Image (cartoon, helix red, strand yellow):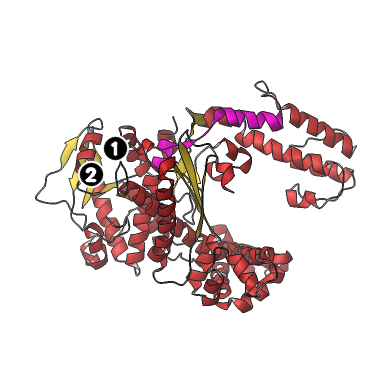
Amino acid sequence: MPIVVERRGATVALVDVDDSGAPRDDRASTLTTEAELPRLIAEREAEHPRWVWTDTARWYPPLLAAGVRVERCHDLRLVDRLLAGIQGRAPRTDWGAPAAARQRHGDTLFDLDSDLHSDLTSDPASHADSGAPRSDSGQDAPLAPPAATYRAQLAAIAAHATARDLTLLSAAESAGALAAAEMTHVGLPWSESDHDALLTAVLGPRPPVGGRPSRLDELAAEVTQRLGVGPVALDSPTDLIRALRRAGLEVATTQQRELQRLAHPAIAPLLQYKSLARLWTANGWAWLDEWVHDGRFRPVFLPAGASSGRWASDGGGALQLPRQVRPAVRADEGWMLVVADAAQLEPRILAALSGDEAMARAGAGVDLYTGMVERGVVDTREHAKLGMLGAMYGGTTGESARVLPRLARSFPAAIAFVEAAARTGERGGSVTTHLGRTSPPPSAQWLDRQSLAAAEGASEAMRRAARTDARSWGRFTRNFVVQGTAAEWALAWLAGVRRRLWAAQDGPLERQPHLAFFLHDELVVHTPAHRVPDVESALREAAAEAGRIVFGATPVTFPVTVAAVERYSDAK
């Protein structure tokens, strides 16, 4: 049963709607204030509704702060982004204030139950044509009331060729938004004293404001002395390249891989300097002061922040949490962190997408790459990994390029699948994930360059540049289908774990097992120690279920490794 939450001036209305999104005649809208809204939603939650609102990041955090959780929702903003990609338009932007500004200081959620089933069976002609009209100027038209927007979205989904998949993806996106808000609310347990201690151990004592750690000064002096070409600005790539060249070292970039190939006494301290400088700037004392409070790191997650559907974060660098600081992620006393990691997720996704049975058999164990070695596809696990990364990301040089022909012979369906996606991108076309997310088109400038290069009289330089552009976009679409579908599987897994923990709830969110962190193919649950076995089962069961939800019957397995630890760093 859907209930639409919409603002009406100074009040908030709860509007009961039917399976088509139309208001019910037999129930009037309930008007309330924002202050009273948590109480009313808590009362109605007993009916197991699907809450329909403009933006979970706007409506859910105040409910959580009041101690109210909701089981299901339909996030109009996230679904609009999905539909915008399919319809070839820009998504709406006028859903309210940015989420970061607000947040900073059944059997399954994916059942096609009564409030979504009619999406698949109703006559699309009986509904509005578009989920988000735009004015002639290209700006957002005045935003329709949420109930009308909901009806339009249901109609757009029902009219889609794969309506069931798109319905599933809409539910998954919305479930992810609920989990994101809950993870920000509870936070990731973080020891400020441990973080300070690990920084001090590698950087020296905390410097005064405006200063920098003593260890960085020492390393900078050592690099300068060993290069012997005068003062060196290590933090300026341009100046550093010039200094290295003056020292007789031919380099094009200051990337780690290139520097590691150089045999010179200045390279070791230079690499150490770069590593510690990144730690200091990204997760040093200033980061600790801003982002960790009361023993919790509370990042602002942005579900579907990337075009592929992968999450992003707004501040805090949550999705780039370096291993150097993970020892500071420590469970509360009497609690544990249960860390689950999906093994070789993207290659397994490719096997399921392409229907490559030979690749599915190679991944029947916990380690797909080891399975490839055992079947004689490649000679080492490292070669298997490099080859698959090359196939999915378009690697055309080095070891991955040398391994790729062997993979193509052993797994022809898988390699053909990503090659076809790449060719589509090179032509300027769009590709879709398994559940229907559509890749964005290349830019107008890209299209113009392709057109000019194909015109009579185009120079060879223009044609070479156009071919380079085409290959680059082909690499994007090649990976989009895999990475985007992996994001769909991960959402299904995340929602499945949340549902299982929800079913076992016996008190406030903070005092029971709860999702605390999500990193693409990794989940962290913070749980009382005596509940660890239940959490481990939930993580494994939800992973197996996610494969069935997304792909149906498939021989591909999606194993996860699970570790119960006191510190995040001990999980691997």
Q: Is residue 439 above or below residue 324?
A: below
User: How many discs appear?
Assistant: 2
Residue 499 appearing in the image: yes
Callout 1 secondary element: loop
Residue under label 2: 45
Callout 2 secondary element: helix
* Amino acid at circle 2: Glu
* Viewer-nearest residue: 205 or 399: 205
Which quarter of the picture shows residue 210? top right
Residue 500 in the image: x percent, y percent? Answer: 35, 51
Q: Is residue 175 left or right of residue 483?
A: left
Q: Residues within 10 Å of mark 1 (few under 14, many from 20)?
A: some
> At 22% from the left edge and 67% from the top edge, which residue is drawn?
123
User: Do the CB atoms of the residues marked 1 and 2 lie less than 8 Å apart?
Assistant: yes
Magenta range: 181-205
Q: Which mark is residue 68?
A: 1
* Amino acid at circle 1: Val
Q: Is residue 503 left or right of residue 378?
A: left
> CA separation, marks 1 and 2?
9 Å
Residue 276 in the image: x percent, y percent? Answer: 70, 37
> At 75% from the left edge and 31% from the top edge, which residue is drawn?
216
Name, please, the residue furthest toward the front. 530
Q: Is residue 199 above or below residue 563?
A: above
Residue 90 appearing in the image: no
Residue 379 in the image: x percent, y percent? Answer: 70, 70
Q: For the stretch drawn in magenta, what is the main secondary structure?
A: helix
Q: Is residue 437 above or below residue 311?
A: below
Which quarter of the picture shows residue 547? bottom left
Tell whether position 250 is magenta: no
